[in-house]
Every structure is written in C-alpha cells, then in structure tokens.
Image (cartoon, grey):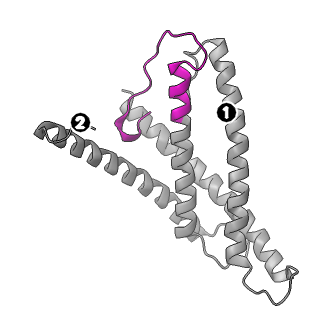
Amino acid sequence: MDFSQMNAAEQAQMSRILEKKQMQDFLKMYSNLVERCFTTCCNDFTSKALSSKEEQCLSHCADKFLKHSERVGARFAELNAEQMGVTDK
Amino acid sequence: MSFLGRGPAAPSSAGSLSSERVEAAIQEVELITDVFNRIVSSCHSKCINQRYLDGELSKGESVCIDRCVAKFFDANKKMGEKLQAMGASAGGAGGLTSL
C-alpha cells in the first residue's frame, strides 16, 4: 500500500493503528485456529486429557493452516497486484 | 483500491489528525484484510482434507488453494460489477436513488 502522500503525523497515526490492528488480527486468527482444529480433531470425550492422536492431529492442523494461509497470501498478493495494475492505468 | 470498482483515494490537503486520507487508508486496509480472511476461511473449508495425516499441504490441496483464491477474486469482481449495474439501472429508471 502507498502511504507516501501522507504527512509525517498521518504516517505515525497510520502505523499506530496498523500495529493495533495486527495484534487484533493475530488474536482473532489464534482463536479461530483453535476452534477450527479443536472441532475437527477432538471428538472423543471419554477422557479429559488430549490423546496422542488428538495432539498429533492438532499439530498437523496448525501446521497445515499456517501453510495454507501463507499460500493464500502469496496468491492474493499476485492477484491483487494484477488487478490494481489494470485499474490504475 | 479496485474492489467494487472504487478508485484509489483522492489525495487531499487536509493536515488534521484522522484526516480523510487516514480514514480512507484505514478503510482500504480493513476491506483488504476482510477479503483476505474470508478467502483463507472459505478456501480452507473447501480445499483442506480434514484427516490431518500430516502437516504438509498435499499437491492436490495446493492446486485447489491456487484455484480457489483466483476464483474468489473473479467472483468478487463479478459481484461488484453486478451490483454496480443494478445500481446504475435502478438509478437510471428513477426508482431508487443510485447506490
């Protein structure tokens, strides 16, 4: 994104807001991830402890989710740049 | 930004805090992150095998993700055009004030 047309005060305000938003987004992603992986991995409540199978499932689920969002991010950036290039002409 | 055919925010000369420029930039960031999060969530549901036998994306999943993101973009664009067309025709017919 291009913030170069802003003055210093605006840029400072912008980065403060973005920092806050990043924190919020991270927390949202975290709780989202827990919910998603818990829902798919933990379905047996005959014990209160996580079984090794569930633990492994959770670990794979988290790994996979992060790789997934990384890949989406890469494609997203490409397509977004492409689209902006078309409309900005 | 290009979503829904909105042009980039026009540069203004206002220097006060929370200027229009900052507001517009924030709105743009929120729109983009919102779309991004929707894509992550939707394509995860559609493409990722729920059995989690390992922590790597399979080849099929990777291809699915690539296509899913591209398709979401296309769908997003199509809906934007559609809404704009609806707004234009409703405005032209004098029924509703333009969107």
Q: Quadrant of the C terminus of chain A?
A: top left
Residue segment shown in magenta:
B1-28
Question: Badge 2 sits on which subunit?
Answer: B
Residue A27: image location, x then y, percent? 73, 50
Mark drawn on residue B98 = 2
Q: Secondary structure at mark 1?
A: helix
Q: Quadrant of the N terminus of chain A?
A: top right
Asked if residue B83 is positioned above or below residue B58 in the image, the reply reads above
The quarter of the displayed image where residue A12 is located: top right
Number of marks in picture: 2
Residue B50: image location, x then y, percent? 63, 76
Residue A9: image location, x then y, percent? 66, 14
Same subunit under labels 1 and 2? no
Judging by the rendered image, the residue that carries numbered circle 1 is A18
The quarter of the displayed image where residue B57 is located: bottom right
Question: Can residue B52 be spotted in the picture?
Answer: no
Q: Secondary structure at mark 2?
A: loop
Viewer-proximal residue, A37 or B66?
A37
Neighbour tally class for label 2: few under 14, some 14-19, many 20 plus, Cα within 10 Å: some
Asked if residue A52 is positioned above or below residue B41 in the image, the reply reads below
**Residue at figure coordinates x 74%, y 79% from the top left:** A42
